[in-house]
DNA sequence: AACGCGTGGTG
DNA sequence: TCACCAAGCGT
């Protein structure tokens, strides 16, 4: 049997039963694909269930507020996906008569849909012949065919895309796409691939040449920046000061507390206090809790202080707003802020 | 076109 | 413990 047929027959026997596989509805497939970008099935699955429950159709999602969408997205990360999801739902509702596109060329124009997602949605919904090239496909193809071009280079992406589009079956491209991704996720895994039970091991370059651990190749090295975030919990009766985060940094659209960031750990905290707080001495600020929160590109040292108040200039400059504790619960927040709140305020 | 964007699982 | 990285995309 050919490589393609082996993967397809393996898939028919070993595929997981996942809810987005039981539909041709492009809206539901799109929803699942956006949620699953850079995300494991186990992590995305409960979010998919909740989104389908709360927004069963495109118009339900289009009519929601961005904050409500982000609230449902809370904890999933890469929040631009959630913002673009909502923006695209509104765009289709307003400009495309609420009909979700299912062909590649229409899909690729939409915000949040790139080459992978356009291929996935079109091939899964209408069986369009467009090869998906995701992390699984890079791994499977590089190992099986012995392709050493870095997958994070422009040339490498081109080569793998060409190869995948040559391999994809004429008869059922959607099924092939599903098969190769599922195979990559369950058998041809990044670490400790299950080569013993691999249906195509006899033809695999990496197996035959002992190059499994060296494929796929990557050229870039991840650089992690360390940051020092200091949050101030300012409470007035049952109200607390919060701020919605703006563009140009992490967590856009989510809410957090008044924030002072230090460039380095050694900056003198006390020298900053008179600029920010009215008649408050350092003794009045109590450190409640500190966290080390790890992002892909950043290592965050996050401290939460209880503060008596902050001055009016700081409030005006930073677009802070007062919300009740009840409202605070319903706002979308970064994981580390959510963690702090549930521990400290016990809500 | 290189880089920034979250969170949690894994070995 | 910690680097890696998972159904990528926007700028």
Image (cartoon, coloured by chain):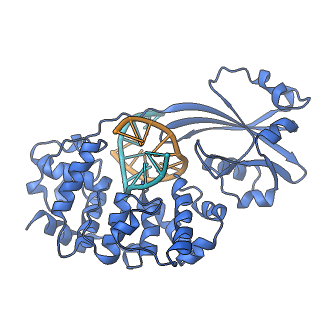
Chain colours: A blue, B orange, C cyan
In this rendering, would A277 be left or right of A338? Answer: right
- Looking at the rendered image, the quarter that the N terminus of chain A falls into is bottom left
- Looking at the rendered image, the quarter that the C terminus of chain A falls into is bottom right
Q: Along the line of sight, which residue is nearer the eye, C10 or A168?
A: C10
Q: Along the line of sight, which residue is nearer the eye, A333 or A67?
A: A67
Residue in view at x 63 percent, y 61 percent:
A71
As drawn, the residue found furthest toward the front would be A95
In this rendering, would A326 be left or right of A85? Answer: right
Q: Is residue A50 above or below residue A183?
A: below
Residue in view at x 52 percent, y 65 percent:
A88
In this rendering, would A65 be left or right of A56? Answer: right
Number of dots carrying numbers: 0
Q: Is residue A271 above or below residue A45?
A: above
Residue A54 visible? The answer is no
Residue in view at x 82 percent, y 27 percent:
A275
Across and down, in percent, residue A9 comes to 18, 72
Across and down, in percent, residue A329 comes to 73, 59
Q: Is residue A337 above or below residue A113?
A: above
Across and down, in percent, residue A234 comes to 83, 43
Q: Along the line of sight, which residue is nearer the eye, A156 or A200?
A: A156
Across and down, in percent, residue A97 comes to 51, 79
**Picture quadrant of residue A346:** bottom right
In this rendering, would A225 be left or right of A153? Answer: right
**Picture quadrant of residue A307:** top right
Residue in view at x 20 percent, y 61 percent:
A165
Residue A239 visible? The answer is yes
């Amino acid at each position: 049997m050919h490589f393609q047929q082996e993967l397809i027959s393996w898939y028919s026997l070993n595929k997981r039963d996942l809810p987005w596989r039981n539909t041709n509805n492009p809206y539901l497939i799109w929803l699942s694909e956006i949620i699953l970008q850079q995300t494991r099935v186990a992590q995305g699955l409960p979010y998919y269930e909740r989104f389908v429950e709360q927004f069963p159709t495109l118009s339900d999602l289009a009519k929601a507020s961005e904050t409500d969408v982000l609230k449902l997205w809370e904890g999933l990360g890469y929040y631009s996906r959630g913002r673009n999801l909502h923006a695209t739902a509104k765009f289709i509702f307003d400009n495309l008569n609420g009909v979700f596109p299912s062909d590649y060329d229409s899909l690729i124009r939409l915000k949040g849909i790139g080459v992978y997602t356009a291929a996935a949605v079109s091939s899964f919904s209408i069986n369009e012949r467009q090869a998906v090239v995701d992390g699984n496909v890079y791994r499977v193809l590089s190992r099986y065919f012995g392709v050493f071009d870095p997958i994070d280079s422009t040339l490498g992406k081109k080569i793998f895309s060409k190869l995948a589009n040559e391999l994809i079956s004429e008869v059922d491209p959607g099924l092939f796409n599903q098969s190769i991704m599922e195979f990559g996720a369950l058998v041809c895994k990044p670490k400790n691939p299950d080569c013993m039970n691999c249906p195509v091991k006899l033809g695999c370059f990496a197996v035959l040449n002992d190059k499994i651990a060296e494929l796929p190749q990557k050229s870039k090295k991840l650089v992690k920046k360390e940051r020092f975030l200091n949050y101030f919990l300012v409470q007035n009766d049952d109200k607390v000061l919060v701020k919605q985060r703006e563009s140009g940094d992490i967590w856009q659209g989510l809410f957090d507390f008044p924030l002072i960031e230090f460039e380095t750990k050694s900056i003198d905290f006390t020298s900053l206090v008179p600029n920010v707080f009215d008649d408050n001495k350092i003794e009045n600020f109590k450190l409640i809790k500190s966290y080390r929160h790890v992002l892909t590109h950043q290592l965050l040292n996050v401290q939460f202080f209880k503060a008596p108040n902050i001055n009016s200039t700081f409030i005006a400059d930073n677009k802070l707003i007062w919300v009740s504790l009840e409202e605070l619960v319903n706002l979308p927040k970064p994981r580390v802020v959510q963690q702090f709140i549930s521990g400290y305020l016990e809500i």
